[in-house]
Image (cartoon, rainbow, N blue to C red):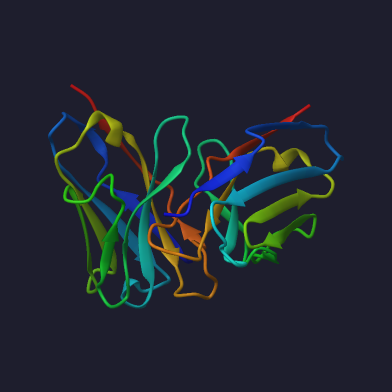
Amino acid sequence: EIVMTQSPATLSVSPGERATLSCRASQSVSSKLVWYQQKPGQPPRLLIYSASTRATGIPARFSGSGSGTEFTLTISSLQSEDFAVYYCQQYYNWPPYTFGQGTKLEIK
Amino acid sequence: EVQLVESGGGLVQPGGSLRLSCAAAGITVSNNYISWVRQAPGKGLEWVSVIYSDGDTYYADSVKGRFTIFKDNSKNTVYLLVNSLRIEDTAVYYCARDPNGDPDAFDIWGQGTMVTVSS
């Protein structure tokens, strides 16, 4: 089973600033990496798939990069609605479809 | 409108059972992969089970032998039968669609149904 590890657990950033979230896989997942955003009381929302492709309707301030075992989600200029929990998920060797433990992005 | 709607959650004693439903609208379960993903209170996401378009099924080790996923194409609904429930099964259970690789991701999620296991 591929283990996904996200860092940091909590990230405090001011609105308008850039946020960088990391995800590491225990073995190569090529570019089969997905990012989700989850707000309190809501289901996850698909943000990025194939490591760097934005899902339909996702603003351009969200970008994903990386391949192999190291991945990054960058939010270029944080808006108030971006403060949420972000999860990565590997889609290379499944099932199981393993998720990271999440990064909580909070207002500084 | 494309949507998944879960139902069937509730309060159940340890060792009890429930049948969770995931009703699809705007998509057909017969030609999509449908997974169940759960989230314990204040915790992260845990994949539970999947049923493929051809009917193949897979389970997380934590639920294998206790949970059963199946679907009724005529009702466009996927079910998760959860047996021998444990305290640690307490969670919101979401169903999610994987459109067979286009993209490789869970692109549609339901709002979830809460399962509480307590004596």
Please indicate whether residue B25 sits to the left or right of residue A21 in the image: left
Classify the position of the C terminus of chain B by image quarter: top left
**Residue drawn at x 27%, y 41% as measured from the top left:** B9
Q: Position of residue A87 (x, y in %)?
A: 57, 47
**Residue drawn at x 71%, y 52% as measured from the top left:** A72
Asked whether B98 or A21 is in front, the reply is A21
**Residue drawn at x 17%, y 47% as measured from the top left:** B66
- Seen in the picture, residue A74 relative to B55 is either above or below; the reply is above
- Seen in the picture, residue A14 relative to A79 is either above or below; the reply is above
Asked whether B63 or A68 is in front, the reply is A68
Residue at the outermost right position: A16
Q: Position of residue B14 (x, y in %)?
A: 16, 30
Please indicate whether residue B96 sits to the left or right of residue B82 in the image: right
Q: Position of residue A3 (x, y in %)?
A: 49, 49
**Residue drawn at x 29%, y 69% as measured from the top left:** B76
Q: Position of residue B36 (x, y in %)?
A: 35, 54
Please indicate whether residue A98 sits to the left or right of residue B59 in the image: right
- Seen in the picture, residue A81 relative to B68 is either above or below; the reply is above
Asked whether B52 or B30 is in front, the reply is B52
- Seen in the picture, residue A85 relative to B52 is either above or below; the reply is above
Asked whether A65 or B83 is in front, the reply is A65
Residue at the outermost top position: B119
